[in-house]
Structure formats: structure tokens, C-alpha cells
Amino acid sequence: MPDDTAHRRADGTLADPHVGDIHRRGIDQGEADLTQARQVFLQGCGLLGEGDAPTAWQGAARWAVLDTSFGMGRRFFATWYAWQQQRQRPARLFYTAVEAAVPEAQDLVRSASPFGPLAPLAAELAAQWHGLLPGVHRLRLDGGRVQLTLAVGAVQPMLAELAGEHDSIFLHRLGTDHRPEPWNPHTLKAVARLARPGARAAGWGMPCEVRQQLAACGFVVEPTPELPQQPQALRALYAPRWAPRPRRDAAAHPVATQPARCAVVGAGLAGAAVARALALRGWQVTVLDRAPEPAAGASGLPAGVVAAHVSPDDRPLSRLTRAGARATLAAARELLQEGIDFAATGVLERHAPGERRLPAKWQDAIDSEAAGAGVASAEAPITQEKAAQADVPLNAEQRALWHTHAGWLRPAALVRALLQTPGITWRGAAPVARIAAAGTAWQLADAAGALLAEAELVVVTAGFDSLALLQAATPAQDARALPLHALRGQVALGAMPGGAADALLPRFPVNGHGSLVAHLPGPDGAWWVTGSTFERGNPAAELRAQDHDHNRERLAQLLPAAAAALDAQWRDGRARAWAAVRATLPDRLPAVGAWRSDHEQKTPPALDSTERDAIELIAKEEALPLHLLTGLGARGLTLSLLAADILAAWLHGEPLPVERSLAHGLRAARWHGAAPPRP
Ligand SMILES: Cc1cc2nc3c(=O)[nH]c(=O)nc-3n(C[C@H](O)[C@H](O)[C@H](O)COP(=O)(O)OP(=O)(O)OC[C@H]3O[C@@H](n4cnc5c(N)ncnc54)[C@H](O)[C@@H]3O)c2cc1C
């Protein structure tokens, strides 16, 4: 891993100034790198065929590549391009790469620009190249068919944070040209944990001792053809002679042998996102909702804010919402019309005087830069210009943040678009009252006992009502263990005031204690929405006059000029109200994945990086447990797409879109054995 003394040359090369040693080859080395990518890695793993011979990935449903070094991205671009050219290519390509020193976006573009077909791929990646803080990031490319999981950090700790089964492994030399770092056995074990039995590995710059270490980890090192200018190339097959031990958290994440029928109960953002994630993986999904139209619950919110949560300790919710905002905006860009149903305008977040919200490490970076400069994250300090537009006084006490990759969204539009995915059947006016196991399937019935659906997999995404459905499906003590709470919320909305007053409402959402989203386009003219209230323990979505007043007062504190411009609408009743019920859990994180009782969870869910992450195939006669996606609280717009991706990745043994430990904290089953919720 490059240390502090490493520096970046003009061509993107990372060099050590003391010894002139090369960590990463720059743009000039492009031709050599590409030859190496093709000869050593792609051919070594059977991904580039000779003549008409079938390639390893031909006809596969999905393919996952693990690369121990991203470098300048050329191996990734070469793999992506080879996948594009492949006949009968896998529907989805996962490429997981570790990188300690992330290149600049411009270096990616320049590194690929001399190589015709790779240049547009690099440009597409560069457009998403932001906010790559240490940790795991998922970048969705090629219409979501290519998913790059970038683990930013040192190889060994990052490998421990990755998950899923990989079919091809690219082992790149560690360290520099003159000072190669030894592969330690733990690193190779971590690689083996991520390999599917039968996976092919290809390596370059591999010292001899690695061959023995690989053999000890279950790889069979194969003879490698002489390749000009490719010293110490290596090929190996992952074929352990021992049966892999089930991973420790296998009981919490059963893997489906193959897609079948799935019933999703609840057509809000959670249900629609899960339905799409599973339909794209080949499931025949039926989405049931008791309402005649989708998005009848909290996801019917007229418009809301998509932005990362920021906290001084950069807690899991903050890290998840950063990944979530990226996932939501990627889906919105793919499925919605920008400027109509969403806009990535950026979001201004106001802090109360003296309130310290940023992690210290970011604050230091910001303090050392001139106001307005960006930090290497999704967030940046607010500029004077933005502050003036939103009428935010900016001084030492009044701090604000500018979320660059954030905006507003009409969730119901996204729900409808997600439900259009081929493979999804929508069924409104279908109130589920009972979910009962019937052999390897589940049967869903209404209160009169009429069968609504039958499916091998059921995912409950019914917001706060998920609790009642669990009670109807599992022993009473199991359902009570999920401490789900109702959190009623109300917003106010109305038409833009018109004329000069419009300029008093900022053109981007402003968040803080309350929020305002204005200049929203609509068929009857532009409009605004502000709120919202938080009323714990009320599961009824009724409108309340005192909440309407409260929203007016809140706006007056958040943006006094905007509140003054809208005041007449409150006085003469033009300002309307809308309310719904959120579902929330005590740790403010959603509940995702299998809902199992204690006795079913045979092994403790502790993480162990050296454990083999084997896939636990559910025995044919055993039904998949009920799955859940709820508890999205006040962040459902930001978290639903990401959480649905995590659920689908667990179910399919795929690479996770966030750190393994972060995803682990979302397991629905974490509440088993928890104290019953307060009534
Ligand atoms: C006032 C307010 C403001 C908000 N602002 C924001 C914001 O700015 N940003 C943000 O990220 N989030 C915001 N949220 C939160 C966000 O709206 C929710 O987290 C999200 O919509 C939850 O989606 P969901 O699919 O889990 O639940 P819901 O959208 O509530 O969907 C649950 C669905 O289940 C159906 N259902 C229930 N029981 C049954 C049954 N027995 N059978 C069949 N169907 C059933 C319901 O009809 C409903 O359609 C806000 C929420 C509120 C209330």
C-alpha cells in the first residue's frame, strides 16, 4: 500500500519519491497494461477465448471478478469491454476491486483515451467517480448490468469487508516494482474465502512462495504458458480438497438455489425496490398491496429529500445513507425524467449555531481549505453564493453543508417506474391477512381466507404494518421481538407564490430541523412542500391542525424569508397538508433479510474474516424463511434501493454493495431475543 511519501506524477503514476519506485503505472504504460490485462488476466481466467472455443463466462447468468488492485482501471475496462463483446454473455457482471490510492477521475479518462473502445467506458465511470472515502462503494454502470464494487483501503482489511462468491480472481503484485510486498497467508485465505469452488485465478508478479501459499488455501497452481514480458505470471484453479465449512453468518443469510416465485407484500418504495432487484435476478415477482394503487403509504409523500446523513462519529446510518443516496440517484437517472420526478440539484443542510455535525477528520480538511472548496466526499462546505441564494447567514456559528450528490424525488413516481420492470406483476386491492408455510412454498390469504398468492419466497415490505403481518405468520413471541414503532409524519404543501416572491424560495432543497423543497414542477404549475412532523406511537395517518401550524413555525426558523413569502397561504387555507406513518427501529437502521427465530439460527452471527464464506444451500424440502424490508424511518427515499440490493445480494451469494460489517448491522434477525417493544 502506498505510504504518505508516495506521490502522484502528472500522468497519474503513483511513485515513491525516495526510491523512484512505481506503485502504479501511469498513462504512458497503458499499452503494456492492456496487453497484460488480456494475456495474463482475461486469458488466464478463460474469459477471452481462442478461436471458437467457449469462454468460461459464456452462458452464465452472472459473473463475478475479484481484482486485488484496481490501479488505473485498465483491467476493469478490458474486462468490461470483453464482456460487452461476448456472445451469450452473463446478464450481470460484478467486478470487485481493492485500491488503497484511488486515481483521479481525469486519470481514468486519460488512461483509457488512447484505446478507442475503452474510452467511453472510462468516461462513464469517471462521471460517477466521487465520494470515494475509505470503505466499500458500488458504482452502477452500463444500465446497471455492470456493477463495480470498489473497496478503498489496504488489501487485507478490505478483503475481510467483502462478500460473495467470485468466479474469476485477478491477483496483482502487492507493493512496488522494486519493493514487492509479500503476500501473507491471511491475505490469501481472505481471497480464497471469496472464491467459488471452480473459480480460476490469474496472477502477475507472483513470487514463488505464493504458489505454495495458494496451494495451502485450496488453489491448484497450473502450468502457465510462456508469455513475453509477463514475468511470474500464474494460473490456478480453486479446488479445495476439503468441504468448505459453512460461514458463521450463513444461518442469517440463506441462499436461494435458483429464482422461483416471489410475493412482495406492500407496494411502497421498499416493496418496489425489492421487486425490481429480484425480478432482475430472474424471479417471477407478484407485488400485493391492500390499496388499489401503488405508493399508498409513506411512499406517497408528495416529494422528499435524498441526501446523506452526517454525524460527528460517521456512524453506520451516515455511511449507509451515503451509499444509499448514490443508489437512489442512479436508479432515478435510469428510470425517471430529471427535472420532472427528481432532480439532483444538491441539498443545503443547515446546522444550529454551535452544532458540530461533521466527522473531525472532514472538519480538519474543510478548515484547512478556503470556504467553497470540496473535500473528497459527497459533502462540501457551503459557498457564500449558495448561502446567499438560500438566505442562510454564514459565519463562525452558523455553519452549513452543501451535499453535492443529493436532491429531491417524488417517491411515488419511482415506485411506479420500478414496478414496470419485466418479471413483476402488480396486484392492488389485495390485503394480506395471513402468511402460512405450505411445504416448500408460502400461501398468502386475505382476512376471509381467500388465497391471494403462493410463492417460494415472501418479502414483507408493509411499513409499520409489517409487524401485524409477522404476527400473522410466525409464533407470537417471534413477531413481538421486532421492536418496530410507528412514527406519524405530516408535511404542508402548496403552489409557488408567484412573481418576485418566488425568488425567496431556494431552487434546491434546504434541510436542517425541518426541510423545504420548492420550485417543484407539476401539471398545474410549480409547488413547494415543507415539513415534517414526528409523532411517535401513532399508527393513524390522519391530518392534524396543530401539526400544520408546527410546520409553519419550523419553516419560519429554517428559512424566515421563504416562510414570510408563504405565510398568506397558511392564513387563507391554500397551504394543504399530507400525512403518513413511517416505521422505525430503535437503532434507526432498517430491518433487512431473513426473519428467523433463535433456534433456527444455529451459529452465532459474529464475523470472522478467515472463515470460508460458503454458500448454504437451502435443502430442497425446506422453505426459504420469511424476508423483511422495513424500518426505513425518515430515510426511506435514500435507503430503499440500497437495502433491496443488500437483500438480493445475500439471497444470491453476490458481492455486497457496502462493507460486510455494515450490511451485517441491518439483518432483520438482529432483533431476535430482543425485549418486546413498549406498547
Ligand atoms: C411526512 C413524511 C416525510 C418524509 N420525508 C422523507 C424524506 O424527505 N426523505 C426520505 O428519505 N424519507 C422521507 N420519509 C420516509 C419515507 O417516506 C419512508 O421511509 C418510505 O416511504 C417507506 O417506504 P416503505 O415501502 O417501507 O413503506 P410504505 O411506503 O408505507 O409502504 C407500505 C405499503 O404496504 C401496504 N400494506 C400495509 N399492510 C398491508 C397488507 N396487510 N397487505 C397488503 N399491503 C399492505 C401499504 O398499503 C403501503 O402501500 C418521509 C415520511 C413521511 C411520513
Image (cartoon, helix red, strand yellow):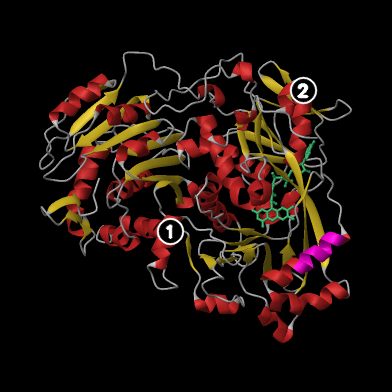
Q: Is residue 173 above or below residue 379?
A: above
Q: Which mark is residue 362?
A: 1
Tell me if mark 1 has few (under 14), some (14-19) or many (20+) residues whose alpha carbon lies within 10 angstroms of its own: some
Comparing 468 with 391, the one in front is 391
The residue range painted magenta reads 546-553
Q: Position of residue 325 (x, y in %)?
A: 55, 54
Q: Position of residue 20 (x, y in %)?
A: 11, 54
Task: Report the residue marked by disc 2.
Answer: 476
Judge whether residue 104 is colored magenta. Answer: no
Q: Residue at x 45, y 72 (%)?
A: 372
Q: Is residue 440 above or below residue 310?
A: above
Is 529 on the left or on the right of 195, as rendered?
right
- Is residue 375 at all visible to an observer of this figure? no
Q: Position of residue 243 (x, y in %)?
A: 38, 14
Q: Please state which amino acid type lies under the numbered disc 2.
A: Ala
Q: Is residue 555 above or below residue 129?
A: below
- Is residue 384 at all visible to an observer of this figure? yes
